[in-house]
Image: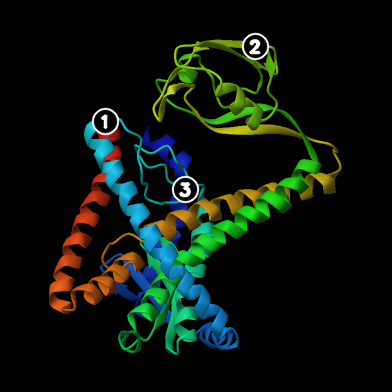
């Protein structure tokens, strides 16, 4: 990609992130800078609301916090297993797809197919992090801890929020209370993902479905060196037929694709009557299934009315649905990432508390905890940078 093409593609992204950096620099005296890339701006905004809500709903908040402990430890084991399995897959199969991905809205990271649009990503990230941090604060306040302040945090140019309980008071609480406070953030992310999913399934999708009809299938991403790319499929093609079967939505397309095995031939028919003949390859996740080489299989829809307000409301529903989708994805991703047994993140702090409780000697426990934390960090860096290096070096 030429410099001119790069600037044209990422112009709005560059302007946005540059503006954020300039704002932080211009107000640098108001920020506390940590590790050179983290900028904290402390306020008292919302502190009274946190204490008020926690006091009015103290027992409910405590119960949810205790439930979150179980979710937190299960999540820690799950994400640890996923990372170890991904590392093993990478060692035995260097072409294995990435298992983790850094989150930078608006930026396509080399080696990763997953792309988060700028504004959906920024709004989603801020929403998810704010819910995460305020949940820590609410559970802490329910257990009698003082909330010192809240604020805005920038991880480089990425914006988030934070809530800062009194750490000295936290140290005096029982290990169970500490677990519940640490797990509150990830647990709130799981709840957020569930609520957003329910809202999409039972409110947004029925509403938008009642306003439109399905008219075909298209793909948001055609993967390189796959049957789809060899057959010259592109994002503008609308598929309405799969062999002799009509497929007007993504569900029917996926159901039909699932019937075919590797090396079997299929014909895709477009809404213009064009045909694409191709032979499926082997699915990398299941050797018994055929593989087309596309991601983001979407349903093409047509509105039942051309009325301006009808179209406006439908557009609003689709935009809200897209935002909810990214909140859902980021909620699960950030929730699980925070349960990694790694240093200062929630999972790391839960593991440190548990290790101290089991071993009974803080110094020895912290030594073991630090080793696990460093090992986790090393695995995480390998999983993140391996796809990037393979892409850049052309492996």
- Mark 3 surroundings within 10 Å by alpha-carbon count, few (fewer than 14), some (14 through 19), many (20 or more): many
Q: Quadrant of the C terminus?
A: top left
Residue 283 percent coordinates (x, y): 43, 25
- Whether residue 232 appears in this view of the structure is yes
Residue at x-position 32% and y-position 70%: 350
Look at the image and name its color scheme: rainbow
Label 1 secondary element: loop
Residue at x-position 61% and y-position 57%: 196
Front tag of 2 and 1: 1
Residue 166 percent coordinates (x, y): 37, 86
Question: Residue 311, located in which quarter of the rendered image?
Answer: top right
Label 2 secondary element: loop
Q: Quadrant of the N terminus?
A: top left
Q: What residue did someone put label 2 on?
A: 274
Q: Is residue 294 above or below residue 138?
A: above
- Whether residue 23 appears in this view of the structure is no
Query: Horizontal placement of 10 versus 220: left or right?
Result: left
The reply to whether dot 3 and dot 2 touch (C-beta < 8 Å) is no
The reply to whether dot 2 and dot 1 touch (C-beta < 8 Å) is no
Q: Is residue 248 above or below residue 276?
A: below
Q: Earlier in the sequence, mark 2 or mark 1?
A: 1
Q: CA distance from mark 3 to mark 2?
A: 34 Å
Q: What residue did someone put label 1 on?
A: 93
Residue 226 percent coordinates (x, y): 43, 20
Q: CA distance from mark 1 to mark 3?
A: 30 Å
Q: What residue did someone put label 3 on?
A: 106
Residue at x-position 75% and y-position 46%: 206
- Mark 1 surroundings within 10 Å by alpha-carbon count, few (fewer than 14), some (14 through 19), many (20 or more): few
Q: Earlier in the sequence, mark 1 or mark 3?
A: 1
Residue at x-position 39% and y-position 63%: 21
Q: Earlier in the sequence, mark 3 or mark 2?
A: 3
Q: Is residue 158 above or below residue 388?
A: below
């Amino acid at each position: 990609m030429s410099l001119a093409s790069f600037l044209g593609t990422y112009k709005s992204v560059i302007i946005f992130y540059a503006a954020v950096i300039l704002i932080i620099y211009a107000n640098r005296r108001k920020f506390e800078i940590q590790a050179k890339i983290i900028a904290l701006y402390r306020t008292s905004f919302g502190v009274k609301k946190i204490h008020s809500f926690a006091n009015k709903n103290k027992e409910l908040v405590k119960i949810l916090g205790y439930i979150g402990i179980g979710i937190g430890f299960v999540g820690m084991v799950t994400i640890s297993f996923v990372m170890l399995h991904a590392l093993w897959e990478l060692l035995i199969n260097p072409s294995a797809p990435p298992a983790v991905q850094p989150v930078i809205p608006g930026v396509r990271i080399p080696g990763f197919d997953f792309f988060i649009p700028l504004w959906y990503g920024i709004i989603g990230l801020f929403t998810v992090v704010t819910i995460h941090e305020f949940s820590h604060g609410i559970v802490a306040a329910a257990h009698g801890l003082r909330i010192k302040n809240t604020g805005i945090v920038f991880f480089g140019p990425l914006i988030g929020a934070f809530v800062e309980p009194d750490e000295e008071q936290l140290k005096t609480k029982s290990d169970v209370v500490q677990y519940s406070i640490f797990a509150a953030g990830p647990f709130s992310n799981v709840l957020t993902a569930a609520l957003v999913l329910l809202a999409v399934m039972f409110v947004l999708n029925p509403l938008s479905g009642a306003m439109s009809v399905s008219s075909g299938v298209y793909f948001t991403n055609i993967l390189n060196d796959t049957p789809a790319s060899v057959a010259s499929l592109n994002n503008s093609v609308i598929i309405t037929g799969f062999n002799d079967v009509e497929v007007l939505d993504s569900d029917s397309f996926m159901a039909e694709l699932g019937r075919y095995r590797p090396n079997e031939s299929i014909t895709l028919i477009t809404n213009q009557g064009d045909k694409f003949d191709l032979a499926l390859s082997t699915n990398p996740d299941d050797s018994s299934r055929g593989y087309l080489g596309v991601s983001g299989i979407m349903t093409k829809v047509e509105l039942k009315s051309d009325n301006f307000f009808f179209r406006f409301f439908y557009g609003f529903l689709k935009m809200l649905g897209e935002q909810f989708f990214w909140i859902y994805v980021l909620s699960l991703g950030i929730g699980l990432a925070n349960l990694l047994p790694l240093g200062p993140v929630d999972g790391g702090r839960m593991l440190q508390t548990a290790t101290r409780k089991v071993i009974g000697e803080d110094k020895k426990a912290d030594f073991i905890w630090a080793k696990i934390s460093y090992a986790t960090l090393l695995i995480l860096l390998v999983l993140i940078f391996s796809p990037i290096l393979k892409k850049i070096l052309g492996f």
